[in-house]
Image (cartoon, rainbow, N blue to C red):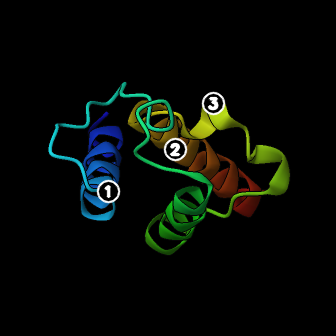
């Protein structure tokens, strides 16, 4: 649970730095619906996830649900890290 909160806080900090927004970004804020990110912003977010969490996003994982909120992004990152760990141990 601590790792999940840490990831959420890092993603929130990244979004606050990358997005001009005076409001608070909650864990369940719909990032695209609120206009906080566009398609180019998504590409930068994916690059951030790769650099900071060593998570590579495959084409088939570019489902909007994976990136619609901080909660969803953190779950995606955690699931990818678990899969990578399992793959390395088999």
Q: Secondary structure at mark 3?
A: helix
Instruction: Please tell me in which quadrant of the rendered image residue 74 appears.
Output: top left
Label drawn at residue 90: none
Sequence-earlier tag: 3 or 2: 3
Sequence-earlier tag: 3 or 1: 1
Rendered location of residue 26, percent (x, y): 26, 30
Q: Label 2 crowding class (10 Å Cα cut-off): few <14, some 14-19, many 20+?
A: some
The residue identified by callout 2 is 78
Label drawn at residue 19: 1
Residue 10 is left or right of residue 58, and the answer is left
Q: Residue at x 50, y 37 (%)?
A: 32
Q: Nearer the viewer, mark 3 or mark 2?
A: 3
Q: Secondary structure at mark 2?
A: helix
The C terminus - image quarter: bottom right
Mark 1–mark 2 distance (CA, rounded to whole Å): 24 Å
Mark 3–mark 1 distance (CA, rounded to whole Å): 20 Å
Q: Residue at x 76, y 56 (%)?
A: 87
Rendered location of residue 47, percent (x, y): 55, 70
The N terminus - image quarter: top left
Rendered location of residue 20, percent (x, y): 26, 56
Residue 36 is left or right of residue 85, and the answer is left
Examine the rendered structure and indicate whether residue 56 appears above or below residue 36: below
Instruction: Please tell me in which quadrant of the rendered image residue 76 appears.
Output: top right
Label drawn at residue 65: 3
Rendered location of residue 77, percent (x, y): 53, 48
Mark 3–mark 2 distance (CA, rounded to whole Å): 15 Å
């Amino acid at each position: 649970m601590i790792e999940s909160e840490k990831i959420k806080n890092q993603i929130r900090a990244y979004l606050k730095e990358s997005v001009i927004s005076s409001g608070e970004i909650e864990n369940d804020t719909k990032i695209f619906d609120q206009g906080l990110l566009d398609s180019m912003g998504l590409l930068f977010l994916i690059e951030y996830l790769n650099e900071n969490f060593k998570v590579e996003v495959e084409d088939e994982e570019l489902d909007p649900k994976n990136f619609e909120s901080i909660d969803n992004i953190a779950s995606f990152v955690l699931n990818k890290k678990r899969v990578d760990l399992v793959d390395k141990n088999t």
